Image: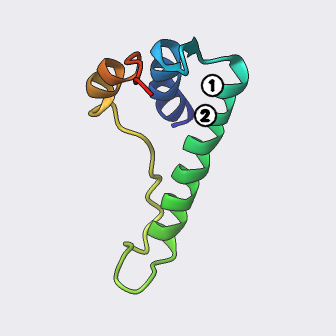
Amino acid sequence: MFVANVTPVMLIASVAVYNGEAFTAIDTALLIQAAMLIAGIGTLIQLYPVWRIGSRLPVVMGLSFTFLSAMMTLAPVRRRS
């Protein structure tokens, strides 16, 4: 589960460009931490539902590889200011 959450983020960070510079190790670590935090929040919402959102089952939420091709296409694009 951990590898499935980290791999898409690392792939996107490897091609991403921000302000004309490649992502540093600190930027990549920040993205990984954010992905793990959101996966944890999603898991807690599944386990302890909020109103009608959630299944009350121990479903572990994570990232998907579905969006990966679109994100890897958009990540290296430099935006004009």
**Label ID, residue 32:** 2
Three-letter amino acid code of the residue under disc 1: Thr
Q: Secondary structure at mark 2?
A: helix
**Label 2, residues with CA under 10 Å away: few <14, some 14-19, many ≥20:** some
Residue at 65% of width from left, 40% of height from top? Answer: 33
Residue farthest along the right direction in this orientation: 26
In this view of the protein, which residue sits in the foreground, 21 or 38?
21
The part of the image, by quadrant, that contains residue 36 is top right
In this view of the protein, which residue sits in the foreground, 71 or 80?
80
Q: Secondary structure at mark 1?
A: helix
In this view of the protein, which residue sits in the foreground, 77 or 72?
77
Q: State the separation of the CA atoms marked 2 and 1.
A: 6 Å
Across and down, in percent, residue 55 comes to 37, 72
Q: Nearer the viewer, mark 2 or mark 1?
A: 1
Q: Are marks 2 and 1 in contact (CB under 8 Å)?
A: yes
Indicate how the structure is coloured in the image: rainbow
Number of marks in picture = 2
Residue hosting label 1: 28
On screen, 71 above or below 36? Answer: above
In this view of the protein, which residue sits in the foreground, 9 or 47?
9
**Label 1, residues with CA under 10 Å away: few <14, some 14-19, many ≥20:** some
On screen, 10 above or below 34? Answer: above
Across and down, in percent, residue 17 comes to 50, 17
Residue at 45% of width from left, 28% of height from top? Answer: 81
Across and down, in percent, residue 2 comes to 56, 34
In-image side of 52 versus 61 (left or right): left
Residue at 54% of width from left, 66% of height from top? Answer: 44
Three-letter amino acid code of the residue under disc 2: Ile
**Label ID, residue 71:** none
